[in-house]
């Protein structure tokens, strides 16, 4: 289902950006996932508009990327974050340029609401991930979120099992080593990577808080698309975190991890996915297949 | 080409009879892109350092070059994409899986093992090279 949004250009100043269409907040335990396909954003004037949204340090960071494509993707990533968060502000239309960001004490980026006197700001959480060909931003309220993307076809330059033995948990290595087909093994390695990475990002305490070898993520028995996180040492699986793994744009695996507030009674994660070009259009992706 | 120097160097100037002592406050990276006037009054090349001086240093040029090669290979960089000591992996488009593969490549090349927390902290070629040399030294100690 395609919903085209006609961008409104304000006539007063040529630098004035079209207004963003506001969005309804996700409900508790629901994740909204927005993605951009860089290849689909070709207009130089649109990219110029995007660059006007960024703060000076963000612009510097974009310019430090080595290569035009890398710079474009870095620009799109910041644009996606700013415009998406700006659209969820229910009370006032927030200019995406005015959003400020800070890092928590471990370096995880979050919104800095200090400029906004409006105390009704929803406790929005977001997390971003990108590959060469896709950029995604996950949004939740009340609970932290982590997302990770990987290209399904991504080549692993080392032996998959050797990498797993070096970085994954013993149970995960066991699981991977039982897979006879190397192509399937590579895919499962990548799926596991995105799940583990999404967890560490949701946790937001830096990689040293949860080295990959210290926890196992495995499919939940008797469910489709549910996963358990179990500690390697104790083998305890607490259920504090919920996972979802999707295929995005036919080309990528996307893993989402959110803190489970236990109120949902073990229900699977709800994810709503949109493909977007900021200021131009949103496309609701109604079929999200959990893996 | 980047030439790195350690925090305190004691050496003899190649031609003059007097011994000069250099003491720098912190490690200095001097980038000599083939320019003839450096803003520094001296210009030192690795080969002019007398071998008998033991130097504990920021990474050797050789290590930096080997690391750069491994990074270039992992990220499939083209020849025109320049990698210097100060290059951040993220600026080259490396994601976390790339970093882990780079670490694995470095471990294989140098015969060392990096603790995961330290490995994931590596952001530049220089940092990788320094950690490698530290681990190689520990190994041979």
Image: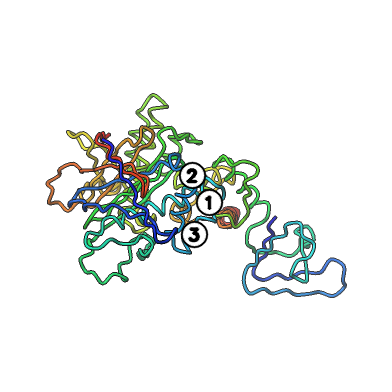
Q: Residue A40 sits in which quadrant?
A: top left
Say which of A206 and B50 sits in front: A206
Label 1 element class:
helix
Q: Residue furthest top?
A: A181
Say whether marks 2 and 3 touch (CB < 8 Å). Answer: no
Nearest the eye: A260 or A118? A118
Q: Residue at x 80, y 69 (%)?
A: B12
Q: Check chain identity for marks 2 and 1: say if they share one.
A: yes
Residue A183, given in percent of the width and then of the height, sits at 41, 27
Q: CA distance from mark 2 to mark 3?
A: 24 Å
Residue with the mark numbered 3: A59
The span from disc 2 to disc 1 (Cα, nearest Å) is 9 Å
Marks 1/3: CA–CA distance = 18 Å
Instruction: Provide the chain ID for the residue under circle 2.
Output: B
Labelled pair 2, 1 in contact (Cβ < 8 Å): yes
Q: Position of residue B121 (x, y in %)?
A: 47, 56
Q: Which residue is mark 2?
A: B98
Tag 1 residue: B89
Q: Are marks 2 and 3 on the same chain?
A: no
Considering the numbered disc 2 on the image, is that residue within a helix, a strand or a loop? helix
């Amino acid at each position: 289902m395609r919903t085209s949004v006609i961008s409104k250009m304000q006539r007063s100043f040529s630098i004035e950006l079209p207004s963003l269409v506001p969005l309804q907040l996700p409900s508790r335990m629901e994740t909204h996932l927005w993605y951009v396909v860089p290849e689909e954003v070709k207009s130089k004037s649109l990219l110029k508009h995007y660059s006007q949204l960024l703060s000076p340090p963000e612009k510097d960071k974009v310019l430090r990327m080595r290569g035009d494509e890398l710079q474009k993707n870095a620009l799109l990533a910041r644009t996606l974050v700013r415009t998406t968060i700006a659209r969820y502000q229910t009370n006032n239309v927030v200019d995406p340029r005015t959003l400020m960001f800070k890092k928590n004490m471990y370096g995880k980026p979050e919104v800095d609401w200090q400029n906004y006197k409006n105390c009704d700001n929803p406790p929005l959480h977001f997390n971003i991930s990108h590959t060469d060909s896709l950029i995604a931003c996950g949004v939740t309220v009340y609970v932290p979120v982590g997302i990770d993307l990987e290209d399904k076809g991504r080549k692993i330059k080392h032996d998959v099992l050797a990498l797993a033995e070096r970085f994954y948990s013993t149970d995960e290595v066991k699981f991977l080593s039982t897979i006879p087909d190397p192509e399937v093994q590579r895919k499962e390695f990548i799926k596991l990577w995105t799940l583990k990475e999404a967890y560490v990002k949701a946790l937001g305490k830096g990689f040293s808080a949860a080295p990959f070898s210290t926890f196992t993520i495995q499919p939940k028995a008797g469910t489709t698309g549910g996963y358990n996180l179990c500690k390697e040492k104790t083998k305890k699986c607490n259920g504090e975190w919920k996972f979802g793994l999707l295929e995005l744009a036919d080309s990528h695996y996307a893993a989402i991890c959110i803190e489970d507030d236990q109120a949902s009674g073990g229900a699977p994660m709800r994810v709503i996915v949109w493909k977007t070009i900021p200021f131009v259009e949103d496309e609701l992706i109604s079929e999200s297949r959990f893996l | 080409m980047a030439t790195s120097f350690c925090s305190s160097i004691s050496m003899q100037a190649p031609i003059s009879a007097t011994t000069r002592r250099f003491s720098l406050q912190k490690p200095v990276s001097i980038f000599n892109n083939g320019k003839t006037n450096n803003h520094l009054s001296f210009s030192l090349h690795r080969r002019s350092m007398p071998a008998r001086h033991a130097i504990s240093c920021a990474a050797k040029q050789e290590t930096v070059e080997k690391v750069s090669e491994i990074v270039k290979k992992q990220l499939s960089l083209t020849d025109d994409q320049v990698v210097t000591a100060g290059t951040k992996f993220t600026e080259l488009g490396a994601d976390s899986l790339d970093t882990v593969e780079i670490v694995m490549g470095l471990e294989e090349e140098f015969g060392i093992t990096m603790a995961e927390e330290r490995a994931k902290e590596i952001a530049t070629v220089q940092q990788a090279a320094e950690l490698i040399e530290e681990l190689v030294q520990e190994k041979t100690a």
